[in-house]
């Protein structure tokens, strides 16, 4: 009896390497949806979707001709209007240049007239100042001055771009380490009180009528903005003026700003500082009232009248 050969088991075939990527394989193998594939095959069998009747072909041709005509017409109009637009643009540039030149000339005329007015005011002060004409001219800022004095430099603290909380916020200013108009007011008043005879900030001469104000973060002196660092020159007895200012309440205030807010300051006695004349002056005079006018108004003869400008 013959024996059957033994059956050898072939075992389970090894899994495909991409068996775990069945979803990705399905997307790759069926990139086009079945419905789209069927519609594409039907359109290809019918002649590629091109119009088959003469009427359809004529309509397609007419549409293409119309589209070409519109594009050609638009290009032609653009070429025609380009020189017109360029001419209008050049005319506008010329008008701007002309108006700018006229504005510059007017500004120069204003500066020239302002200088003439200032010069005449200075001459009036010198002519009618009597024995104290020179002193009056110095105190009013009508004439340039030079002599011994002090140089005080005040600058914002380093890194003043961001603000924060601090005691200075209570008066409307954030603690940013910036020099404020009220700080500059105290510094200038402290110099006057310490014996300064004339004061200028960044070349801007101060008078008894000068105003130090703020516009945003900028400090204005007589409506002219200043840029830090602020260089303050004061004419006077240099060493004595420096010591008196640093010992004054305003000097201590400036020192406190340096210690608490990082505002940078430096002061030095100078052998010779030069200050320009004030750019514009407001001349005011006062006259005593007569005895008759005083009796008529019921006032004492020692009263003086209101100043006129």
Image: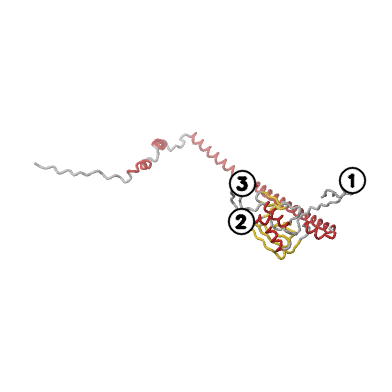
Residue 308: image location, x then y, percent: 83, 49
Mark 2 and mark 1 lie on one chain; the one further toward the N terminus is 2
Q: Is residue 37 above or below residue 95?
A: above
- Identified at 84% across, 60% down, the residue is 131
The N terminus lies in quadrant: top left
Task: Assess disc 2: are there few (<14), some (14-19) or many (≥20) residues with their C-alpha within 10 Å of its C-alpha.
Answer: few
- The Cα–Cα distance between marks 3 and 1, rounded to whole angstroms, is 89 Å
Disc 3 secondary structure class: helix
- Identified at 85% across, 59% down, the residue is 130
Instruction: Point out the frontmost of discs 2 and 3.
Output: 2
Residue 200: image location, x then y, percent: 72, 58
Nearer the observer, 159 or 197: 197
Left or right, 255 with respect to 118, comes to left
Residue 39: image location, x then y, percent: 41, 35
Q: Which residue is mark 1?
A: 295
Disc 2 secondary structure class: helix
Can you tell which mark lies on residue 259?
2
Give the quarter of the image for residue 141: bottom right
Disc 1 secondary structure class: helix
Task: Assess disc 1: are there few (<14), some (14-19) or many (≥20) residues with their C-alpha within 10 Å of its C-alpha.
Answer: few
Give the quarter of the image for residue 139: bottom right
Nearer the observer, 184 or 96: 184
Q: Residue furthest right?
A: 292
Q: Residue furthest bottom?
A: 271
Mark 2 and mark 3 lie on one chain; the one further toward the N terminus is 3
Q: Which residue is mark 3?
A: 79
Model colouring: secondary structure
Task: Assess disc 3: are there few (<14), some (14-19) or many (≥20) residues with their C-alpha within 10 Å of its C-alpha.
Answer: few
- The Cα–Cα distance between marks 2 and 3, rounded to whole angstroms, is 70 Å
Nearer the observer, 90 or 162: 162
Instruction: Point out the frontmost of discs 3 and 1.
Output: 1
């Amino acid at each position: 009896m013959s024996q059957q050969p033994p059956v050898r088991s072939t075992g389970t075939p090894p899994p495909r390497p991409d068996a775990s990527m069945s979803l990705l394989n399905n997307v790759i193998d069926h990139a086009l949806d079945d419905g789209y594939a069927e519609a594409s095959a039907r359109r290809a069998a019918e002649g590629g979707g091109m119009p088959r009747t003469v009427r359809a072909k004529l309509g397609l041709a007419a549409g293409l001709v119309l589209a070409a005509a519109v594009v050609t017409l638009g290009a032609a109009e653009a070429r025609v209007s380009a020189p017109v637009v360029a001419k209008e643009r050049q005319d506008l540039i010329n008008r701007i240049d002309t108006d700018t030149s006229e504005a510059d000339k007017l500004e120069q005329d204003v500066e020239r007239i302002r200088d003439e007015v200032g010069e005449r005011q200075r001459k009036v002060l010198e002519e009618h100042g009597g024995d104290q004409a020179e002193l009056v001219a110095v105190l009013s800022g009508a004439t340039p001055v030079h002599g011994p004095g002090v140089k005080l430099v005040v600058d914002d603290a380093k890194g003043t771009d961001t603000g924060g909380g601090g005691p200075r916020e209570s008066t409307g200013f954030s603690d940013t380490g910036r020099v404020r108009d009220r700080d500059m007011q105290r510094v200038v008043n402290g110099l006057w009180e310490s014996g300064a005879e004339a004061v200028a900030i960044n070349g801007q001469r101060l008078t008894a009528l000068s105003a130090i104000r703020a516009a945003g973060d900028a400090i204005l002196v007589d409506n002219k903005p200043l840029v830090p660092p602020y260089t303050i020159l004061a004419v006077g007895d240099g060493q004595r003026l420096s010591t008196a200012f640093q010992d004054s309440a305003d000097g201590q205030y400036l020192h406190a700003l340096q210690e608490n807010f990082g505002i940078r300051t430096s002061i030095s006695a100078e052998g010779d500082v030069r200050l320009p004349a004030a750019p514009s002056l407001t001349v005011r005079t006062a006259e005593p009232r007569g005895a008759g006018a005083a009796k008529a108004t019921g006032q004492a003869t020692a009263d003086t009248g209101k100043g006129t400008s």
